[in-house]
Amino acid sequence: MSQGVRPFPLTADSDDIQFCGNCVFAPWCLENGYDVSDLAELHVLVEHVGPIAEGEYIFREGESFDAIAGIRQGTVKTYVIDLNGKEQVQGFYLPGEVIGLSAISQGRYPCNAVALEPVQLCRFTFSRLATLSAKLPALQDRLFRLLSEDIGKAALLAGDFSAAERMAAFLVELSRRYEARGLPHDEFRLPMARIDIANYLGLAPETVSRIIRRFQQDGLLRVQGRNVELGALSRLNAIASNVLRA
């Protein structure tokens, strides 16, 4: 990962025998019958990194891959620069999610990852994590599921969907991801700019603003700055159903 990323001490929710409350691996393993002592080897693999300031890079396209990182705090944007020199947003990653998985096959990071707000990470050297996962089947299962989720995110909006369907799917999927991590899911702050949302959805920024205004007029949501309240989640789900298929 890029230079300039600074390690910081273990926080109050971690010590020599306990794990971070929002670790992307430990809760999954605990659910599958391991106790804290069983996971000691996992704990010593963790390097706490940050805070990483808004606009700082976590890794850059083409850098050698050596680690994946779980996001403890903040939001990360991944993107590439296309052959025409234009930015193409690939995804947004929230607390409790993992960045760097797409680099495993090639051994190099295939995109850039930048902090959209102050970010703190748990960094796992992948070779050591892979060795440990062979001893802890639940950890290995968690890795496979994370890879599957990452592929699913990339394919989410690949179809021929309308602007309204894309925007509704983006909001509903974001809400589901917040809910899965025990965070408020019907009222939250969008950490990304509308121009980034538009880029990710393959829409013009003006189209995103128009759809948001229409959703507000229809009582589907309320927006103040970057704060969003989903006022009719079931109706948004209905609009997004063709994209999300669930």
Image: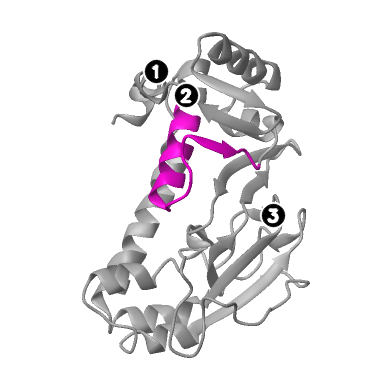
- Amino acid type of the residue that numbered disc 1 sits on in the rendered structure: Ile
Q: Which mark is residue 239?
A: 1
Please say if 165 is above or below 77. above
**Residue ID at (66%, 61%):** 119
- On screen, residue 24 versus residue 11, left or right, reads left
- On screen, residue 205 versus residue 69, left or right, reads right
**Residue ID at (43%, 66%):** 24
Q: Which quadrant is the C terminus positioned in?
A: top left
Which mark is first along the chain, 3 or 2? 3
Callout 3: 10 Å neighbours few (<14), some, many (20+)?
A: many
Query: Dots 1 and 2: beta carbons under 8 Å?
Result: yes
Which mark is first along the chain, 2 or 1? 2
Q: Which residues are magenta?
A: 168-191
Disc 1, SS: helix
- Amino acid type of the residue that numbered disc 3 sits on in the rendered structure: Val
Q: Which mark is residue 168?
A: 2
**Residue ID at (35%, 69%):** 27
Q: CA distance from mark 2 to mark 3?
A: 25 Å
**Residue ID at (22%, 71%):** 32
- On screen, residue 141 versus residue 200, left or right, reads left
- In the image, residue 28 lies at what x, y percent? 32, 67
